[in-house]
């Protein structure tokens, strides 16, 4: 039932078909169709990234799609895209640092750059940046409140 709300069009359609069928349709879906649908969803997502991503991401996605391994697209989505986007992410972090951010953002960005891994760069942009920005905003707000005059 939960896969009816899936973002993947293949998984959604396969789950809907199975649930509208017989018990044997549901068992077939659990045993085989679910995995096939997920692989199709992964290929669809990889194709999107091949078209929408930067040159390095597009090349890595194309290689994953051309590969013969059944889980090549899933591997690309879980790890390959992060590795392929490393240079783009490094440039994005340099732009963040060039915008004179607050202390928390500066520290988090430098920590990501100093870690030297694609995963650290990805995690900064997708998680730590927002948290650090909130911290800097809170400090700026507190400073304004403490220094404001009537």
Image: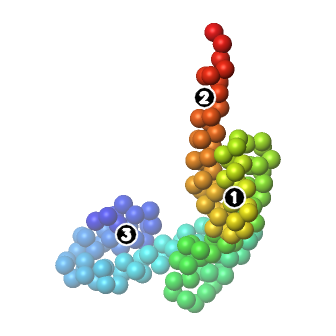
Residue 58 seen:
no
The mark nearer the N terminus, 2 or 1, is: 1
How many marks are shown on the rendered structure? Answer: 3
Q: Which residue is mark 1?
A: 111
The residue that appears at 60% across and 28% down in the rendered structure is: 142
Label 2 sits on a secondary structure element that is: helix
Q: Residue furthest left?
A: 23
The residue that appears at 31% across and 84% down in the rendered structure is: 31
The residue lying toward the viewer, choosing from 104 and 56, is 104
Q: What percent of the width, then of the height, locates residue 36?
A: 42, 81
Q: What percent of the width, then of the height, locates residue 138?
A: 59, 35
Discs 3, 2 touching: Cβ within 8 Å: no
Name the side, left or right, on which 34 lies relative to 149.
left
The mark nearer the N terminus, 3 or 2, is: 3
Quadrant of the image containing the N terminus = bottom left
Q: What percent of the width, then of the height, locates residue 3?
A: 35, 66
Vertical placement of 100 versus 43: above or below?
above
The residue that appears at 25% across and 81% down in the rendered structure is: 27
The residue lying toward the viewer, choosing from 79 and 27, is 79
Quarter of the rendering containing residue 53 = bottom right
The residue that appears at 64% across and 39% down in the rendered structure is: 136
Label 1 sits on a secondary structure element that is: helix
Quarter of the rendering containing residue 23 = bottom left
Q: Which residue is mark 2?
A: 142
């Amino acid at each position: 039932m939960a896969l009816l709300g899936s973002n993947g069009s293949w998984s959604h359609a396969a789950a809907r078909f199975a649930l509208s069928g017989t018990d044997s349709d549901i068992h077939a879906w659990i045993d085989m169709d679910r995995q096939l649908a997920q692989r199709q969803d992964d290929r669809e997502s990889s194709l999107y990234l091949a078209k929408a991503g930067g040159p390095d991401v597009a090349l890595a996605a194309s290689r994953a799609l051309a590969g013969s391994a059944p889980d090549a697209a899933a591997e690309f989505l879980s790890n390959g895209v992060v590795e392929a986007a490393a240079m783009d992410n490094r440039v994005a972090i340099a732009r963040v640092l060039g915008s004179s951010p607050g202390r928390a953002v500066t520290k988090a960005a430098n920590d990501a750059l100093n870690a030297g891994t694609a995963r650290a760069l990805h995690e900064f942009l997708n998680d730590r940046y927002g948290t650090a920005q909130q911290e800097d905003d809170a400090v700026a707000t507190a400073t304004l409140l403490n220094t404001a005059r009537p």
